[in-house]
Structures are given as C-alpha cells and as structure tokens.
Amino acid sequence: MTQRRERRGRPARGLHLLAIAALAVATAAVPTVAAAGAGAAPAPSSATTAAASSPDLGAGTLVLDPSMSIPDIQAKVDAIAAAQMSNEMGPERHAILFRPGTYGSADQPLNFPVGYYTEVAGLGKNPGDVVINGSVYVRNQCRPSGCIALDNFWRSMSNLTINVTNPDAGCYSGQFWAVSQAAPLRRVHVKGLTTLMDYCTGPSFASGGFIADSKFDGTVVNGSQQQFFTRNSTVGTWTNGVWNQVFSGVEGAPAECFPAATACGGPYTTVAKTSVSREKPYLYVDESGGYRVFVPSAATDTSGVSWAASG
C-alpha cells in the first residue's frame, strides 16, 4: 500500500499540562512507585496537598465531575472539539480532565472527538477510577482529495477506561483513534473494538503512533498505519500494519515477522520485555480532593501494564 505523509506548519509546542499542574500544586506531595516496575497505586502521604477545590490550571483546562449532567458535559466537550478539529495552526491549547467517577451510560453514552492541541485525561490514581461509557475518538479529515489521518497530530488521551458504547455510530462503531504521530495513548483501558485507522472513509491513510501502559480487551485494528510503537501494554488481538510495527513488552503481541515481504506476511518486530523504561508523570486527585503529581519509578525487564493489580 502506497501512502503519502504530510507534515505542515510549525512544530507542536506540546501539551504541557503536567508542567503547568506541577507549578499549580507546588505544595503537593510527589509520591513515587515503591519498587521499580511494580505499578502500584500512589502511596498515601502526610505531606501537604493542594486545596480540595481545583487549582488554577489555566483558561484552557476543563475539569469535569461525575455529578454534572451528560448533556452539560457533552455540550462542553463538543464546543472544544468544534474549535479544535481543524485548528492545526492555531495557538489555543486545551485539556479535558475527568475527576474520578463514571460518565455516560448505555442509554446516554458520552461520545466526543478530540481535535488539535487537546489532551483528554482521567484524574484517578489508576485507569479504572475514571470510566467513560461511550468513546473518545479521532477520525479522518476529509478534503476534496480524500479522507485521511496523515495530519491528525498533537492530541492525547491517558489514565481512563472506555467501555465502548456507540450503538448508533454505524460504520464508526468502536473506539477510533486514527492519528499520525504526536498523539499518544497512555494508561488507557479500552473494553471493546479499537481501531487505529478510520476505514469508514477513503483512502484512510495513517502514519504512525505510540501506545504505552495500556490494555485492550478486544481487537486492535492497526490497518493502514505505516508504523506504530506499542510498549508495555496488553492486547487481545492485533491485526494488520503496513511497514513497521514494533512491540516491546506487550502481552498478546503478534509473533515477530519482519520484513512484511516474508512468507509470514506481517511487518512485526516483537521484543518480549522492555529493558529500561519509565512512564510519564501524571496528575491525579487524592482521597481528600487534593491535586497531586505521581512520578513513576524507572523499570527494567518489564512487560504488560504497570497498573494490572489496580484495575
């Protein structure tokens, strides 16, 4: 499959939410994992925490609470998406943060797209602390020349669980994350179909991405992705790929088969364990409502997710 790769505009300035959060909660404790690679939940601390009310995380940060109505939440996240879906060159930056709890239901799911310069993250200690019944998705961008994901950059999702619930989505039924680099998934648990390409509109080209510390209970459709790196994760079934798909410490990864022209037919490089790694720090809300930053320890010779025992 021949694909073209687009790179337009200036480099991303990044979604430095954690840096902002660290400044905002300078008095908060910064716990670390007790043992390298243990993946334990942050340990309690007697250190001073931030106030129970939300610190000032900036005008671009939306903090959502499970007590809010789904129509209210839907309106807020849709407004951000409407502003950012085509805002590739704009200066705006957004973070959508979910406090611990459940959002959406089978009868009223929460489904919304993620545009440029938008971070979606849960504020729990572990991915299971924030549950979205619905989907948080990225689809192709359509132009007169066709519909592709080659310039779906600069967005992310982390630290939450998605029970895929979008029965009225037609072809888009599932958790779609059709991106091309600079759009990582971290500490995400998806229960249902995940696809890294948007096969609903053509030609559906995509150009690579990154997954870490995540679990996928169902099938992951890699599809048209030119290259992809998945580290320290668990997958049910991984399908397809174009040129170069690398797995390091991934439970359920396909067997090594490289290059794609060989008889086995898959562009897979598979390493059983990750020799050295360290997960990204993240913001969470503790039992008293204070905001803290959790800094994971470095880990050696690991596979699977760090939070397996915590759900």
Image: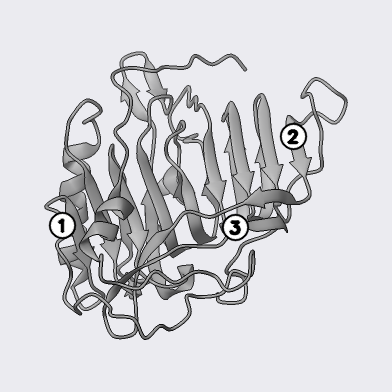
User: Mark 2–mark 1 contact, CB under 8 Å?
Assistant: no
Specify few, some or many for label 3: CA neighbours under 10 Å numbering under 14, 14-19, or 20 or more: some
Callout 3 amino acid:
Ala
Find the distance from the CA under tag 2 to the CA under tag 1. 41 Å
Describe residue 153's horizontal placement relative to residue 57 as left or right: right
Image coordinates for residue 38, horizontal then vertical, percent = 63, 70
Image coordinates for residue 109, horizontal then vertical, percent = 33, 65
Q: Is residue 201 above or below residue 280?
A: above
Q: Disc number at residue 298?
A: 3
Callout 1 amino acid:
Ala
Image coordinates for residue 80, horizontal then vertical, percent = 18, 47
Q: Disc number at residue 268?
A: 2
Task: Identify the mark nearer the N-term, 3 or 2.
Answer: 2
Q: Residue at x 43, y 58 (%)?
A: 281
Callout 2 amino acid:
Tyr
Q: Quadrant of residue 83?
A: top left
Q: Secondary structure at mark 2?
A: strand
Image coordinates for residue 230, horizontal then vertical, percent = 61, 44
Q: Is residue 46 above or below residue 208?
A: below
Q: Nearer the viewer, mark 3 or mark 2?
A: 3
Quadrant into which the N terminus falls: top right
Describe residue 89's horizontal placement relative to residue 43 as left or right: left
Q: Residue at x 85, y 31 (%)?
A: 264
Find the distance from the CA under tag 3 to the CA under tag 1. 40 Å
Task: Identify the mark nearer the N-term, 3 or 1.
Answer: 1
Task: Identify the mark nearer the N-term, 2 or 1.
Answer: 1
User: Mark 3–mark 2 contact, CB under 8 Å?
Assistant: no
